[in-house]
Image (tube, grey):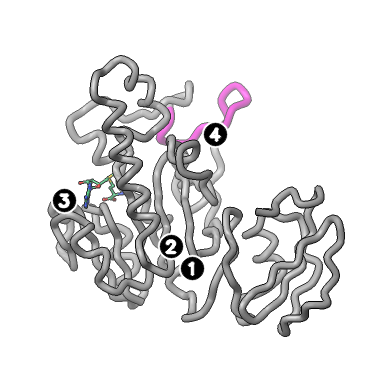
Amino acid sequence: MRVLVACEFSGTVRDAFIAYGHDAMSCDLLPADIPGPHYQGDVRDVLGNGWDLMIAHPPCTYLSVSGLHWNKRIEGRAAKTEQALDFVRLLMDADIQRIAIENPVSCISTRIRKPDQIIQPYQFGHDASKATCLWLKGLPNLRPTNSVAPRIVNGRPRWANQCDSGQNKLAPSPDRWRLRSETYAGIARAMASQWGSLKEGDRWLSQNGCGLFSPATCNPANVAENLGAPSIGNISPNANASVPVTQKTKVIKLSNVMVEVAFGDAGEKER
Ligand SMILES: C[S@@+](CC[C@H](N)C(=O)[O-])C[C@H]1O[C@@H](n2cnc3c(N)ncnc32)[C@H](O)[C@@H]1O
């Protein structure tokens, strides 16, 4: 698979894909921390170079919910938020079959669309909490690989990177943003092992759109999980237009399978 890891200087996701045998390159305005295939420059220069998958980590400074209150107090900051959103739209709309955009909880959710998934490093083997949103195209949700239990403080879960109050422990410093923005290695490995093993023609349904499944990867549990639906009524390897559509189900016609999905409320998840 040819993989572009956009807006990455650490080489973490790039090297995870290379370890799984893929042809991966990182790209950032900054030089790479670790030697390896890296384009130092604007990602727009290389977006059209024939990638099978792009994972992008666009800057969150002017997008993250925690900083938006400054937009009213600092002149010109709101315009930077608009520019940052335009950059995200450009990445989301790139002509690449599979795309994952990663960002913290941000105004992408309200201004563009809700994320398909919110993951935590503690679901991928790290003793750390950091809500990370994923906007996916042509990709299944990431499956957690290794759950790390928290300590409990006054009834609340806390992980090693958090004070008892829940704040991040990292003290202010010039490179705090760098340390905070690096992708966790366990998440990078999960992306490489799960997304790197998709085959040509495999398509996935996301909660926000219609994707397609190949029969090889199509099992009811995965489909239910990817749709956020409580159950899957029927999966047939042959498209069959006569599958009944009831008030509480929707038949989704896929390239080579027919999936009947049961929803809690009629049409609740229908888009
Ligand atoms: C939040 S950091 C992501 C860090 C990443 N998770 C990692 O592990 O290296 C965002 C990065 O986007 C880069 N960036 C911003 N605009 C860019 C552009 N037009 N093309 C390429 N990289 C860009 C910045 O230099 C910054 O390093």
Q: Is residue 34 left or right of residue 194?
A: left
Which numbered dot is residue 29? 3
Name the residue nearer the viewer: 183 or 152: 183
Amino acid bearing label 3: Leu
Residue designated by label 1:
194
**C-alpha gap between disc 2 and disc 4:** 27 Å
Disc 3 C-beta below 8 A from ligand 1: yes
Q: Quadrant of the C terminus?
A: bottom right
Residue designated by label 4:
151
Residue designated by label 2:
191
Q: Are marks 2 and 1 in contact (CB under 8 Å)?
A: yes
Indicate the position of residue 202 as horizontal and vertical percent values.
Answer: 53, 76
**Marks 2 and 3: which is nearer the front?**
3
**C-alpha gap between disc 3 and disc 4:** 39 Å
Q: Quadrant of the N terminus?
A: bottom left
- At mark 3, the secondary structure is loop
**Marks 3 and 1: which is nearer the front?**
3
Name the residue nearer the viewer: 8 or 204: 204
Q: Are marks 2 and 3 in contact (CB under 8 Å)?
A: no
Amino acid bearing label 4: Arg
Is residue 221 part of the magenta span, yes or no? Answer: no
